[in-house]
Image (tube, rainbow, N blue to C red):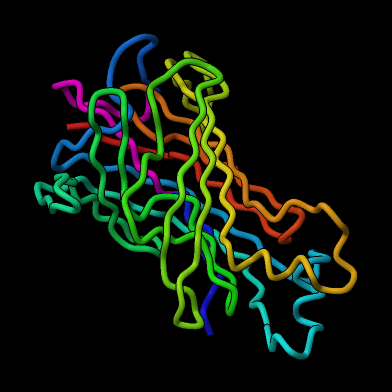
Amino acid sequence: MKKLYLFGAVLAIAAMGCKKSSSNGGGGSDSGTFQPTTSGSTWSYSVTENFNAANSLLLSAAEADTALHLVFPVIDTTYTMNVTATSSDTTVGGVSYTVLQANGPTGNLLVAPQDTLYWGLGVVPEFEIPGLGGTVSPQPFLYLRDGPVGESWAQTVYGPNPQGGQDTIYYNMSITAVNQTVTVSGQTFTGVTEETVSVLPGGITALESLPGIPQGVSLAVSGTFYYARNIGLIEVNIFSGTFGFSYTEMLTSYTIK
């Protein structure tokens, strides 16, 4: 049986030519990258996942539908995710991506910052429902822009579904705040951009026809991501009453080479 994964692991960390420690917080208000690739830089995150289909009208109805044969595992876990930037790279579609080693559920990440555009493969949200497909992207996509408040964009990604066919995954991104000051794990970060990400796997729309599902209910999975300049991703918050889960990811320590 496939497991539900919610993996907020877009790891954006910046290199400023000197070593930084998490004890002092960090970031910058008006310059610096959101996605460094300096080999040897490390980041640690505290991750908490909670999921129970019984708390979701949508998924409890899916389990009760005998034709679907779906059973969702309960998840209640906290773990540390460690990330290390490597000197390795790989080419996908003519673009060179840096490999970030990570011990999260989806493994290593590929990242390719290009001026104000940030491309990635294996980045969040990662959400999979057994038998219905998910949002684990098999293709690179634009997960962040260094733009003003209100800048938004949409993307469509195609990937295999559990039935052996093809699923369509719809991404919508929006910049909701810039140059913010945010405190995470007792550390204060400046130059923070806030981004909202909404993802809808095409296969999940099959749940709309189940008895007892309210008309017009949103099946998209949404999360809020916070990126500090010269540090990277510092916090992820995902909550979905529709699917009965929550996910948080907090930066606890880092070293920038």
Where does the magenta region start and end? 9-23
Residue, far top: 30
Horizontal and vertical percent for residue 235? 50, 37
Q: Is residue 99 found left or right of 62 in the rendered image?
A: left
Give the answer, above or below, for where 192 lies relative to 117.
above
Q: Residue at x 65, y 52 (%)?
A: 220
Q: Residue at x 53, y 41 (%)?
A: 236
Name the one closer to the observer, 253 or 136: 136
Magenta residue check for 20: yes
What is the quadrant of the C terminus in the image?
A: top left
Q: Is residue 98 found left or right of 60 in the rendered image?
A: left
Q: Is residue 37 found left or right of 245 in the rendered image?
A: left
Magenta residue check for 252: no
Q: Is residue 187 found left or right of 109 in the rendered image?
A: right
Give the answer, above or below, for where 194 lies relative to 105.
above
Horizontal and vertical percent for residue 202? 58, 62
Horizontal and vertical percent for residue 93? 19, 51
Give the answer, above or below, for where 149 lies relative to 155.
above
Q: Is residue 185 visible?
A: no
Q: Is residue 96 visible?
A: yes
Q: Residue at x 69, y 70 (%)?
A: 206
Q: Main secondary structure of the magenta part?
A: loop
Q: Name the quadrant containing residue 113.
A: top left
Horizontal and vertical percent for residue 19? 19, 26
Q: Please give the count of numbered marks on the rendered protein.
A: 0
Name the one closer to the observer, 93 or 104: 93
Residue, far left: 87
Name the one closer to the observer, 23 or 101: 101
